[in-house]
Image (cartoon, rainbow, N blue to C red):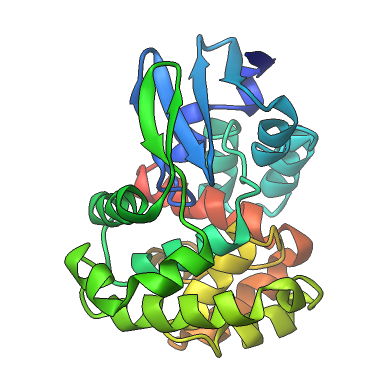
Amino acid sequence: MEKIEYGAEFFNPLHTLDCGQIFRFTPFKDGFMVISGEKACYLHSDGKKTVVECDDGDYFYNFFDLERDYSAIVEKAKSYGVPLLSRSAEKCAGLRLLNQRKEEMIFSFIISQNNNIPRIKGIISRICAGLGEKREFMGMEYFAFPSAAALANAGAEFFKNAGCGYRDIFLDETAKRIAAEGIEKLEKLDTYALKKELMTYKGIGAKVADCISLFGFSRRDSFPVDVWIEKIYKEDFGGKLTDRNKICDYFCGLFKENSGYMQQYLFYGKRQNL
């Protein structure tokens, strides 16, 4: 068992897990059990230091983006002079963007569209239990996220029975395409081309493509726009645009390479009524 310790000021488990970027975590002991792919860790904090207990320290060090200096990102957020952004960055300085599995994020965010987080978590859990390899960590049983090949062989009926609704066809067709083609070609694309290519997959629109780019491919110049961001754009930025694609372009032009960090501060801060 490996243990990673990090200052809690810039690594808050709840803020990091509760901002909509990850769905595979559950309360465990004094913190959370976090699952990524086939790996799991125990994440907890005493308010002074945050601890990651795991069997693969290198993986989770990268997963939680612990090499990056978030103090500089927080200061950058404050420099824009937007009250909501400044408050959110200061009060949620421990929110970190995760470096997650690409394929897992593609399927997870297809499931996420027009859905709520508890239901998304339930669907993903059922899919993993049905197709993933059984594992155990610290006495707790969990299931690995299935491979694209396993998902491709499951059939649309499996996804329907898992509660995916109309997304069953999206998952089935996307799984078959990824199983046949792989995703190596996606990794080589710049962010604009990546988003455009992701949107050629069944069930992936602009917002989902931006989420996959940001949370799966670690493209921090992405800025997903949903109903919360539209609200923020109008109320906190005085925006007049109504087209989400144009709102996305506005924020990407404003925040550039920091877009993803600012999106998470704004999104989480607004939802928490900071």
Question: Looking at the picture, how far across and down is residue 201, in whole percent?
Answer: 52, 85
Question: Is the residue 162 above or below the residue 72 in the image?
Answer: below
The answer to which quarter of the image holds residue 62 is: top right
Question: Looking at the picture, how far across and down is residue 97, in whole percent?
Answer: 62, 46
Res. 162 visible in picture:
yes
Quadrant location of the C terminus in the rendered image: top left
The answer to whether 86 appears left or right of 59 in the picture is: left
Point 57% across, 63% down: residue: 103
Question: Is the residue 75 above or below the residue 244 in the image?
Answer: above
Depth check: 46 or 44 in front?
A: 44
The answer to whether 38 appears left or right of 169 in the picture is: right
Depth check: 43 or 154 in front?
A: 154
Depth check: 89 or 31 in front?
A: 31
Point 36% across, 29% down: residue: 141
Question: Looking at the picture, how far across and down is residue 60, in whole percent?
Answer: 66, 33
Depth check: 142 or 24 in front?
A: 142
Quadrant location of the N terminus in the rendered image: top right
Point 61% across, 45% down: residue: 98
The answer to which quarter of the image holds residue 216 is: bottom right
Question: Looking at the picture, how far across and down is residue 123, in whole percent?
Answer: 27, 57
Res. 227 visible in picture:
no
